[in-house]
Amino acid sequence: MPLKLLVASGNQGKIREIKKYLNDLDIEIVGLDDFSLPPVEEDGETFYENALKKARTRARETGLLTLADDSGLEVDYLQGKPGVYSARYAGAGASDEDNNKKLLEELKGVPAGQRGARFKCVMVLYDPELGEDISVTGSCEGIIMEKPRGDNGFGYDPLFYVPEYGKTMAELTLETKNKISHRARALSKIKKVIKDRYTENE
């Protein structure tokens, strides 16, 4: 019987991405759609606090080994903001366009050398039997542009310039983005943890 892993998300795109990334491990991956559970309020002050709360709550409710993540954008000039508020930076129910507009306003007149930023993802794997968690972090460094560029991404992707490729995240192919993204980098670390701790080494 393969190990069952719950991904604490109802986002089918995210679950597909994780399944694809972990498909060579002997595990069965399920999402929240397989259960009827109340929402978890993400009220932590850090990505780790939010990811831990989601993973621990869902693991205790289902009894399954659970993986949860929280991610967002950190801008150096803004002392790490928008951070955990990335999705609602311009207020509750804000669109990507609203959030991007607010970010550009806050960085108006700030020179390129001070517009450093990173996309950051913290993943937490919670084991309800042991009552312990393992966390990993993935990040992707870049610079915030003065104007959006590209149509392939979402969120802050059109403003996030990746010097290594000379393009914004929204100008990169999905294949390239999935290799260098903060989530992909965190996932590669969590894959090693699952392989070493929960599956038989080949």
Image (spheres, rainbow, N blue to C red):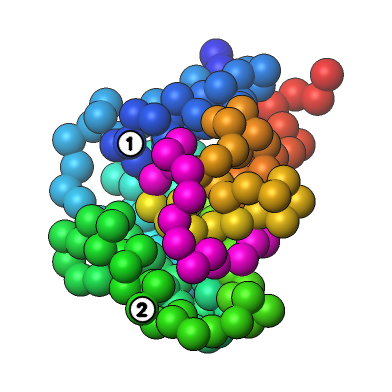
- The picture quadrant where one finds residue 89 is bottom left
Point out the residue furthest to the top here.
Answer: 1
First in sequence: mark 1 vs mark 2: 1
In the rendered image, which quarter contains the N terminus? top right
Q: Is residue 13 visible?
A: yes
Percent position (x, y) of residue 99?
31, 65
Q: Which residues are magenta?
A: 132-154
Is 86 on the left-hand or right-hand side of 116?
Answer: left
In the rendered image, which quarter contains the C terminus? top right
Q: Amino acid at mark 1?
A: Asn
Residue 199 higher or lower than 197, as above or below: above
Q: Amino acid at mark 2?
A: Glu
- Whole-angstrom CA distance, mark 1 to mark 2, is 30 Å
Q: Nearer the viewer, residue 66 or 157?
A: 157
Q: Nearer the viewer, residue 18 or 114?
A: 114
Q: Nearer the viewer, residue 119 or 60?
A: 119
The residue tagged 2 is: 105
Q: Label 1: state its secondary structure.
A: loop
Percent position (x, y) of residue 7?
42, 37
Q: Residue at x 32, y 73 (%)?
A: 102
The residue tagged 1 is: 11
Please tell me whether residue 111 belongs to the stretch shown in magenta.
no
Is 97 on the left-hand or right-hand side of 50?
Answer: left
Q: Residue at x 60, y 82 (%)?
A: 111
Q: Alpha-carbon neighbours of circle 2 within 10 Å: few (<14), some, or many (≥20)? A: few
